[in-house]
């Protein structure tokens, strides 16, 4: 295997592929990426056995020699990253060693045979759809912050994708809050559910761009696959049952509060400074056209913020985790938000006042 490539051409896909490589690996080959040269193209694959990422780039080298091998991901990324801009890089496999030359620099990396490299087996696709990268990225962005992280309820350490009636709904919850977002996929009318693991969601989001380029998503019983331009992303699915999120959505909330998103965000952020660092609780006190947010901490420090809102109704006092509310306000796009509340012991519903494609549920706190 031998080829020459420009630093700028290889660096971005190399960094993307190495993102799938497991940091704490049990098998030495999982620290490597597979490099395969054939038909004037370079294919690079990284995996941790759960997530696999494949990048392909066209080589303009007339003297390339086909072949394949696996090389240490981090070392190769670091070498390419630290070479000067515009550098030409020659990679040459000789006797189980990869020799990298660029200008007056020379590196020799150890390799492992490509025959030992594990790849995720393909499974028959149950359904597929095509949408824009921008839409798919936004769908994930609006809800990914509510995913659990290393929860013993393993099925919460990911995101539910549910297809029903031409709509793809993404749901994430850690048991204390829930985020839900939707996009239309009119070509799909069959019902389907799957749980994509946390790492798969985060890696897929890194690949999706804020542009109207297409992305094709394939779903099967065991895998999700995303064809994103020069990248092919595959992730195993979580084997488990996601809780029925519809039962968590508050019903019958009769206290509607509407206000400017930016004003509320800044108010909550200021009060959060003096909230209890461990529990992050803040108190919301509602009266006609006013929301008072207050917090205190074990050092006897206090913060209070009064914000003008649109509200007519009975007075209400309820506590929430301020970090959860700030996460929601940071995710919402619009200028105005709506809080739907009922009493001090019921969850609150937060949404963009002018767009119902995403909604958020936050459980109350006793203060």
Image (cartoon, helix red, strand yellow):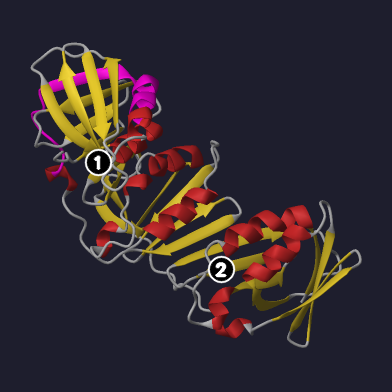
Name the residue carrying label 1.
165
Count of all numbered marks drawn on residues in the image: 2
Q: Could you say where residue 73 lies in the image, as x and y percent from the top left?
A: 63, 70
Name the residue carrying label 2.
46
For the record, the magenta segment spans 248-268
| Vertical placement of residue 311 versus 168, above or below | above
Can residue 256 be found in the magenta stretch? yes
Q: Quadrant of the N terminus?
A: bottom right
Visible in this render: residue 335?
Answer: no
Q: Residue furthest bottom?
A: 95
Helix, strand or loop under label 2: strand
Residue at horizontal 81 percent and vertical 51 percent from the top: 85
Can residue 114 be found in the magenta stretch? no
Residue at horizontal 27 percent and vertical 57 percent from the top: 156
Q: Could you say where residue 229 lies in the image, as x and y percent from the top left?
A: 58, 50
Residue at horizontal 66 percent and vertical 71 percent from the top: 35
């Amino acid at each position: 295997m031998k080829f020459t490539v420009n630093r700028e051409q290889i660096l971005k896909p190399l960094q993307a592929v190495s993102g799938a490589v497991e940091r704490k690996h049990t098998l030495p080959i999982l620290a490597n990426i597979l490099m395969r040269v054939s038909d004037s193209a370079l294919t690079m694959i990284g995996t941790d056995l759960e997530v696999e990422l494949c990048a392909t780039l066209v080589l303009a080298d007339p003297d390339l020699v086909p072949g394949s091998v696996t090389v240490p991901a981090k070392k190769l990324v670091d070498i390419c990253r630290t070479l000067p801009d515009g550098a030409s890089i020659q990679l040459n496999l000789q006797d189980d060693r990869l020799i990298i030359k660029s200008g007056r620099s020379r590196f020799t990396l150890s390799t492992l045979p490509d025959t030992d490299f594990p790849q995720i087996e393909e499974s028959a696709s149950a359904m597929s759809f095509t949408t824009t990268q921008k839409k798919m990225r936004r769908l994930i962005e609006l809800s990914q912050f509510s995913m659990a992280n290393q929860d013993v309820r393993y099925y919460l350490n990911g995101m539910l994708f549910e297809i029903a009636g031409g709509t793809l709904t993404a749901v994430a919850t850690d048991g204390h809050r829930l985020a839900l977002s939707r996009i239309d996929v009119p070509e799909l009318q069959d019902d389907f559910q799957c749980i994509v693991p946390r790492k798969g969601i985060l890696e897929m989001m890194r690949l999706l761009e804020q542009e109207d380029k297409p992305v094709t998503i394939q779903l099967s019983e065991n895998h999700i696959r995303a064809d994103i331009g020069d990248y092919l992303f595959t992730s195993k699915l979580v084997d488990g049952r996601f809780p029925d999120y519809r039962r968590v959505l508050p019903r019958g909330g009769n206290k509607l509060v509407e206000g400017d998103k930016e004003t509320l965000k800044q108010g909550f952020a200021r009060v959060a400074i003096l909230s209890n660092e461990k529990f992050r609780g803040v108190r919301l006190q509602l009266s006609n056209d006013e929301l008072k947010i207050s917090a205190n901490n074990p050092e006897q420090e206090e913060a209070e913020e009064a914000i003008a809102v649109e509200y007519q109704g009975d007075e209400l006092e309820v506590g929430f985790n301020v970090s959860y509310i700030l996460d929601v306000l940071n995710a919402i796009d619009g200028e105005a938000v709506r809080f739907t509340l009922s009493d001090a012991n019921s969850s609150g519903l937060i949404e963009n006042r002018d767009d119902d494609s995403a909604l958020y549920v936050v459980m109350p706190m006793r203060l």
